[in-house]
Image: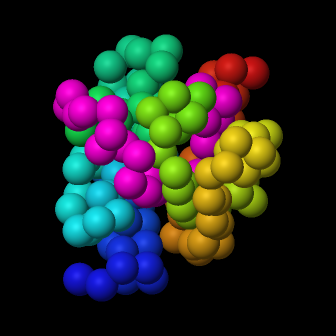
Amino acid sequence: MTRGREWDKLGMDIAYEEAARGLSEGGVPIGGCLINNKDGQVLGRGHNMRFQKSSATLHGEISTLENCGRLPGKVYKDTTLYTTLSPCDMCTGAIIMYGIPRCVIGENINFKSEGEEYLKSRGRDVAVMDDKRCQKIMKEFIEQRPQDWFEDIGE
């Protein structure tokens, strides 16, 4: 597989699959995956598991990192994190902490955190794909389960 757009398509397809899986499990439809920029290897994938595991912190991006297992710190320095939705402050912090240089976001219409600008200010490459699938699944979730959405974002 070649770099760039093909890897971005793969990454977002996986992230969306994870979001749909989370929704089918009764959770928040936010998914992610981490791909090695050198060879396109998928290092991990995950989805928001807050409701499924009664967790305060298991957002889609955190679940993705958890599912990568323990990796040497240098591995993260040449990866891209794909997420279906603009990362919250907690997930933004994880991206910064592990030195992930690139974050590709499915959509930021339904939710846009200050994290995007903070990532950019810290030298991270941030791209928003305006993925209609991601927009639709999140919009429907927020409309159908607003109380669960507000809980997920700490409001």
91 in relation to 47, above or below? above
Counting labels gives 0
Within the magenta stretch, is there residue 85? yes
Residue 8 seen by the camera: yes
Q: Position of residue 141 (x, y in %)?
A: 57, 48
Q: Residue at x 23, y 50 (%)?
A: 43
1 in relation to 26, above or below? below
Q: Residue at x 41, y 61 (%)?
A: 16
Nearer-the-camera pick, 17 or 78: 78
Q: Position of residue 36 (x, y in %)?
A: 30, 58
Nearer-the-camera pick, 127 or 63: 127
Quarter of the figure with residue 63: top left
Q: Position of residue 33 (x, y in %)?
A: 35, 52
Q: Quadrant of the C terminus?
A: top right
5 in relation to 52, above or below? below
Report the span colored magenta: 69-92
Residue 121 appears left or right of 72: right
Q: Position of residue 27 (x, y in %)?
A: 42, 36
Residue 111 seen by the camera: no
Farthest residue to the front: give it: 74
Q: Residue at x 21, y 62 (%)?
A: 41
Check the image and tell me how it is coloured: rainbow
Q: Residue at x 23, y 83 (%)?
A: 1
28 in relation to 52, above or below? below
Within the magenta stretch, is there residue 127? no
